[in-house]
Amino acid sequence: MINTIIDISHYNTIQSFTNASQAGILGVIHKATQAFGYFDPTFNQNREKVVAAGLLFGAYHFGVAGDAVAQADFFLSKVGKDTLLVLDFEGNPQGHDMSLVEAEQFVHYINQVTGRYPGLYSGHAIKEALSNAGITQPDHTELSNC
């Protein structure tokens, strides 16, 4: 058993979520939204298949520069409040990156609406953003609650 959670979007084709489960996949975090208007066309269909296979399910929003509250609102309107929620905070190859302040606004709003913080998915972007902002302590950013 590999005990793994996988990240998928419309770019991925999974032939059988039941086979994935039998191979040790525990759950799926699926890209749901990006920016203010993109909704992954495979999200709802894959969500049904993942849940039917008995896997855990979560949804993520790929953050971009701009109104973070509007992005969070759009995300929640598509995925609901009861699933695992995640912010994908990394470089945007198609435009401007979400800023640290925007990421904090996004997670703050999600917490206000749902009563819990979303997960945070990031690579070097978080390290660079925190360093550029001079943040050296976890309690200096709301992102540490994620």
Image: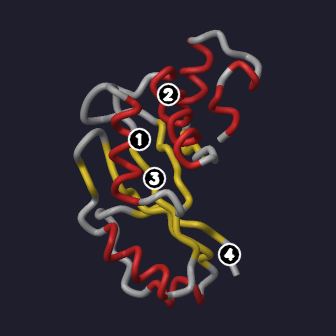
For image coordinates 52% across by 83% down, the residue present is 20
Pointer 3 residue: 60
Labelled disc at residue 72: 1
Q: How far apart are labels 4 and 3 at the CA level? A: 22 Å
In the image, residue 14 above or below residue 4: below
- Return the disc, 3 or 2, that comes first in the chain's sequence: 3
Q: Position of residue 70 (x, y in %)?
A: 34, 35
Tag nearer the camera, 4 or 3? 3
Q: Amino acid at mark 4?
A: Ile
CA gap, disc 3 and disc 2: 16 Å
Q: Secondary structure at mark 1?
A: helix
Counting residues from the start of the chain, the first of labels 2 and 4 encountered is: 4
Which residue does the numbered mark 2 point to in the structure image? 105
Q: Nearer the viewer, mark 3 or mark 2?
A: 2
In-image side of 39 versus 130 (left or right): left
Q: Is the Cβ of the residue at disc 1 closer than 8 Å to that at disc 2? A: yes
Q: Considering only order in the chain, which callout, 3 or 4, is on the residue closer to the N terminus?
A: 4
Task: Work out whether mark 1 precedes mark 4 in sequence or the reverse, and give the earlier one.
Answer: 4
- Is label 1 or label 4 in front? 1
Q: At label 1, which amino acid type do we have?
A: Ala
Tag 4 secondary structure = loop
